[in-house]
Amino acid sequence: MKNLLLLCLSAALCASFITVRAAEKEKKKPAVDVSKLPPPSDKKDVTYAGDIKPIFDKSCVKCHGAEKPKARLRLDSLPGALKGSENGKVIQPGNSAESTLVINIAHLGDEDDYMPPPNNKAKIGPLTKEQIGLVRAWIDQGAK
């Protein structure tokens, strides 16, 4: 009985420690200045199939496609993009400035999360302001 009590106590302490460490890590994330985001495009009726998929195919799908998608994020289909990654949703339909995907492709926030990563093996360059603006418009218009 004593051993069981000690085991339960150890597990509770361990869980508390992990929770505190996760909260500390979350607090250390740099604040993102959304005023530095390129503005959304003025284009109306932006769709994944017609406007966004070509951008993702060129810049994202090599790492976030069907074969071994990094962080389990699939950007090769609309359902995959909306599902998100192992860390949660990356697109907030209707709110591009709060979408992790936009923050990362705009190279704001944590440098470890920049997409595509600088100096990547595939030598894929960053998205242009126009491409980011189009992704923002798509998300702001509901990500359809």
Image: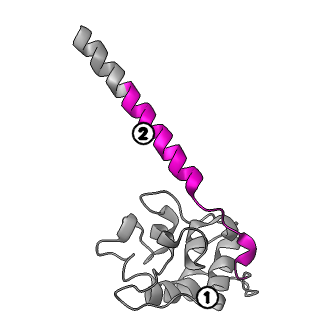
Disc 1 element: helix
Disc marking residue 131: 1
Residue drawn at (53%, 60%) of the image: 89
Q: Which mark is residue 18?
A: 2
* Rendering coords of residue 31 (x, y %): 66, 62
Outermost residue on the top side: it is: 1
The kind of residue on which mark 2 rests is: Ile
Three-letter amino acid code at the position of disc 1:
Gln
- Along the viewing direction, whichever of 47 and 1 lies nearer the viewer: 1
Marker disc for residue 53: none
Q: Nearer the viewer, residue 44 or 84?
A: 84
Q: Quadrant of the N terminus?
A: top left
Image quadrant assignment for residue 141? bottom right
Mark 1, Cα crowd under 10 Å, few <14 / some 14-19 / many 20+, is many
Q: Is residue 82 magenta?
A: no
Magenta range: 12-38
Bin the neighbour count of mark 2 within 10 Å (Cα to Cα): few under 14, some 14-19, many 20 and up: few
Give the left or right position of residue 99, taking residue 73 as reference.
right
Rendered view: 29 above or below 40 = above
Query: What percent of the width, then of the height, locates residue 63?
Result: 37, 78
Vertical placement of residue 26 versus 116, above or below: above
Seen in the picture, residue 103 relative to 31 is either above or below; the reply is: below
Query: Overall secondary structure of the magenta stretch?
Result: helix
